[in-house]
Structures are given as structure tokens and as C-alpha cells.
Amino acid sequence: MPVLYGKFEMPEKITNEKSTPPTFARFVAEPFERGFGHTIGNSLRRMLLTSLEAPSIVSIFIEGVPHEYMSIDGIIEDMTNIILNFKSSLLRKLPMDDQGYDSRTPRVVSKFLNVTAEDIEKNGEVSITLGDLIEDGEFNVVNPELHLFTVTKPMTKRIDLKVAIGRGYVPSERHVIENRVTDEIVVDSAFSPVRLVNYEVENTRVGQDTDYDRLILEITTDGRITPEEAMVFAAQIGIRHLEVFAKMQPQQLIFEQNEAKSDDDRDEIMQKLALRIGEIELSVRSTNCLNGAEIEFIGELVVRPESEMLKFRNFGKKSLNEIKAKLHEMNMSLGMDLAKFNITRENVREVILTYLQNHLGKEA
């Protein structure tokens, strides 16, 4: 039999105070019970800094260069400085589970660098940038203008870069690279895409009480993921680690809810939930995908989590972003908890049909 616990004050939504540059965002969540601001803030900060994944170069092969302690004829920088420049490369990729390969396996990006005499004659030298070696394809280049080395004489060289997805900071000696070729130089890799996380906790008011917590979280990334992605990924990592403890449950907790919403509040939310998909002006592709999944009403849509939506046939990221944007305009979102309106995923359609018949006099 479930054990009844008292109500916990929890934020119903997170405010995202976007700013310039796009690699920085400030999130505000309130109210939390006293002490939970630090508990949640510190946990998220640690996961943001240590647990997120991104691509990074793990090895470099330059034709005719056997090791990193040498100079290269026709190139101003020595190999040590070139490797240091490569370590500042920023590549973006979010591997999806339907791509058909292990995203942990390093991918080879190969380029034949061809610098002609005509190229040299223009300025006496040619600056080679990251964008010259990696074109947008499997990986998106965040900083294509990054200078790698300067060529002062005509040359043709093959350059192979191995790019892997990982987490944290991995020194070269810890990389495990299969099928390593001769003259391949393994390098240290900084996979973490989050550069800085700050959080602070302030007092906030709930009714007459002023000792609740407001959590302010500031996230700065390097561009390989957005601050919004970083926040969502870290939260999901934390939830996954806590699931194993919840499974121990000898008894389940249920929590007291806020006082029942007024009739006006319920009617307002029901008007939105009872809208049909065709009434919110989605693209034909998104509408067809939802119809194929037998989702007729907005209420049937918002109770589904984002991860489930991506499993629908012919449903991609573009359709997902369109739906999320449209729901945001309605002050709604995917994965909504409607328990305070006595609405669950199991009964949402029945509740909507009853509402349409009783309140609006419409046919189901």
C-alpha cells in the first residue's frame, strides 16, 4: 500500500534567459523546498562538467611526419605547435540510435591537401584552417576559421584525422585505437563540451513564506552543444542514475497535491487539450505523422515524452522541433504531468471526449 507524504513545492517550468553569445544561457527554476536548490544545483553542475559527450580528435596522421617532435619542410610551425592547434578543434555531432553503427568507434576524416605555386604567389604563404581539412558532413565544424599551420612552398600531403565521441578529458596514453597505422600520432582529447557552470540559490516567496529556494544556473558551452541541450542531457543522466534506487521500493510514495484548481483554471487547460491536431497549423508532414500514431487531440500529444515521439514512423527532429515550438506558444510542452487535473495518459482521451460533449456540445 502506498505511503502518503506531504506536498513538496516544485517548479512547474524552467525560465530560460537566453543572451548573447548563443553558447551562454541562464536558467531560473523556482520554487524548491528549502535546501533543494543546492541539492539540485550542485548535482546538475557536476554532471554538466563531467558527464556530457561530444566529438574530439583522437589521432592525427600527416603524410611524411613520423612523430610529433619534428619540423616539416615548407611549413612554418613545427609538429608540436600544429598538434596544439588541432586540440582547439570544435566538432559537433549528436549520434542517433538509428544510424546503424557504434558511435563510440572513431571515424576517419581524410583530406588530400594540395597547395600549388599559384596559391603561394598570392601572399607568399597559405594559412590552412580547420575548415580546409574538414568539410561539413558527418561532423559539423563549429570553428572552421581555426588556424592550424602555415604553408610556404607547394606541397601535396594526405592528412587523416580520427574523431571519436567520448566524455571528460582523456590523455593520449589512455586512448584505445584499433587498426592504428604507422606514423599515426595519438593526441590528448577534451570531450567535455561545457566550459563553465555557475549556480546560486536565492530566497523566493510561496504565499506568505519567503524561505523557499530559487535556483539560478548559468551554463557556458564551447558550441559543440547548446546550453539548452546541456541542461536536458545532464538532467536525464541524473534521472537514469536515480532509477536504480527507486526500483528498490518496498513501498511506493505518493504525495499530496496542491488544492484543486478552480473551474476557470481547469476550463482553460481543457480548451487547449481538446483542440484537434488539425487546428494548430502544423506542417503536412508533422500532421500525417501524428495521425499515423492515432493522436487526434493536443491532450493526447502533450502527455507523451519527447523520446517516444522520435520513435514514430517518419517522425524526425525537424517535426519534433516544430511541434515543441507550437506547444511553447500555447504555454504547453511534451511530457506534461496533468495529474493535478485528474488526467493521465490512460484516461486523457476519455476526459477530452467527455469535456467536448458536456461543455461545448460537440460531437466526439
Image (cartoon, rainbow, N blue to C red):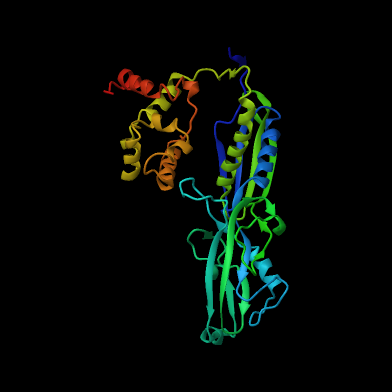
Residue visible at 48% across and 38% down in the picture: 307
- Numbered disc total: 0
In the displayed structure, would residue 183 be above or below residue 90? below
Judged from this view, the residue extending furthest toward the top is 1
Specify whether 51 is left or right of 340. Answer: right
Counting from the top left corner in percent of width and height, residue 321 is at 44, 45
Counting from the top left corner in percent of width and height, residue 147 is at 61, 70
Residue 322 appears in the rendering: yes
Image-quadrant location for residue 346: top left
Query: Viewer-proximal residue, 2 or 8?
Result: 2
Counting from the top left corner in percent of width and height, residue 283 is at 33, 45
Specify whether 348 is left or right of 146. Answer: left
In the displayed structure, would residue 293 be above or below residue 97? above
Q: What is the quadrant of the C terminus in the image?
A: top left
Image-quadrant location for residue 233: top right
Query: Viewer-proximal residue, 163 or 135?
Result: 163
Query: Viewer-proximal residue, 27 or 194?
Result: 194
Image-quadrant location for residue 255: top right
Specify whether 46 is left or right of 102. Answer: right
Counting from the top left corner in percent of width and height, residue 99 is at 46, 50
In the displayed structure, would residue 277 be above or below residue 246? below
Q: What is the quadrant of the N terminus in the image?
A: top right
Residue visible at 49% across and 20% down in the picture: 261
Residue visible at 65% across and 74% down in the picture: 65
Residue 283 appears in the rendering: no
Query: Viewer-proximal residue, 338 or 249?
Result: 249
